[in-house]
Image (spheres, coloured by chain):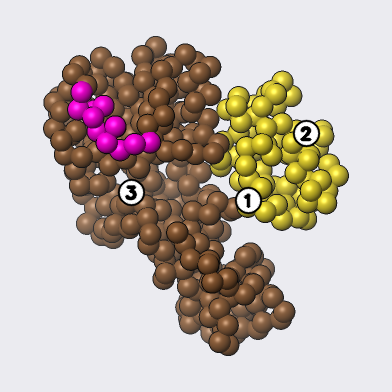
Amino acid sequence: MNELIEVLKTIRPEADFANSKDFIEDGLLDSFDVVTLVAALDKKYGISIPGDAIVPENFKDVQSIGGLLKKCGVNA
Amino acid sequence: MTKQRVKPESIVIIGTGRLAANCVEACLEHSLSVLCLESEQLMFSPLASLCRKRGVEYRPAFERQMLTDFFLRIDKPTLVVSAFNYYIFPASVLENPVLNVVNFHNSLLPRHRGRNAATWSIFNQDAVAGITWHQVQARVDTGEVIIEKEIPIGTDTTAMDLTLKSLDLAAQAFREILPALLTGSYSVQPVSRTDGASYHRSTEVPNDGWLDLGWSFARIYAFLRALDYGKFRILPPPRLRLLGRELTITNYRWQRQPAPANATNTIELNGNILQLRSGGAELSMTCEESKQDSKHE
């Protein structure tokens, strides 16, 4: 999970991900951030997150992003 | 030329996404009262949450006629900031004398008016793209220029990269012009460039989305980058016809520097990987058979 926070920090260094319960609701990630994050995760883990998985519930917190990665065969 | 425009007593920001949010933030830094109209329904827009947190009045406003009625009813001097907004202000709204309407466009006007300017800048192999804040006229993206800023297009810049840079630069430029907008007295310039004027509709795609293997290597690479918005489906994925097959390009990367424009291309298809070589340069494209329903909506 710390790995994910590190990736998130590269995208929005100023955002306080550790103290947010919902990154989308709190306005920490917008659509461009999410697409940038998906590209970073694809590259880091050698996967291809499908476009139809880019929905708010998969990016609301570290757990949900971890769950998405798990579906793609990655244990982050 | 400096013109006196309405000195606003209130501000309406219409648009969506991070640029609209940044404009709201800039207005709040001036302790201004703002009404925010979100004109597009984005899955991840930060606008609603920002307004909620900062106590800004927020209204989703996806219905065009409702917006027109709203603007026609305004009767006190108001600055309307159109920031990443696809609602087109009709002449009747622009004739309301208490409104001063300014808009962001992601090109150096009059180049690439209309939609997907980042795509067209890259596909045309422009050396420089840019952003413009301009007065709004009834004809789309034609009003006098308040501020413009250039963005150099690198050899690897994608449409996504350029869009992100445009939004950041637009937010910075808005902060620069906001104090003048609030006085109602500021300089504007007519669109003076005469070269490269163009207008693109949302349904237009470079070469209808088809890669032409007869193009130069640089042109092919520009085409791929022009359609590249990461996993956003803003435009359809690039396609090509080869040996009687219609293929969709799902990924691409160049392995060596782009070749001279006059070098000859050689093409090799190994499984689902198409290798294009030209004058020492090499571009690798992952392809799949095109689906019948892959047309852009």
x then y, percent, for residue A25: 60, 27
Q: Amino acid at mark 3?
A: Leu
Q: Which chain is yellow?
A: A
Q: From mark 3 to mark 1, how far is it between C-alphas?
A: 34 Å
Q: Residue at x 54, y 58 (%)?
A: B228
Report whether A71 appears left or right of B47. Answer: right
Q: Is residue B147 left or right of residue B281?
A: left
Q: Chain of mark 2?
A: A
The residue wearing badge 3 is B108
Of B44 and B225, the residue lying toward us: B44
* Residue B27 location, quadrant: top left
**Amino acid type of the residue tagged 2 in the rendering:** Gln
Q: Residue B9: where, in percent of width, then height?
A: 25, 14
Magenta segment: B62-73
Q: Rounded to the nearest whole Å, what is the CA distance between mark 2 and mark 1?
A: 19 Å
Whole-percent x, y for residue B99 in the image: 20, 26
Q: Is residue B200 above or below residue B24?
A: below
* Residue at screen point 27% across, 36% down: B65
Q: Is residue B129 above or below residue B8?
A: below
Secondary structure state at the residue bearing disc 3: loop
Secondary element at tag 1: helix
B89 or B100, which lies in front? B89
Direction right: furthest residue: A75
Using the image, tell me which numbered label, if any, was put on residue A63: 2
Badge 1 crowding class, 10 Å Cα cut-off, few under 14, some 14 to 19, many 20 or more, is few
From mark 2 to mark 3, how far is it between C-alphas? Answer: 43 Å
Specify the label residue A52 is tagged with: 1
Residue sitting at x 53%, y 76%: B240
Please state the chain letter of the residue tagged with numbered disc 3 in the rendered image: B
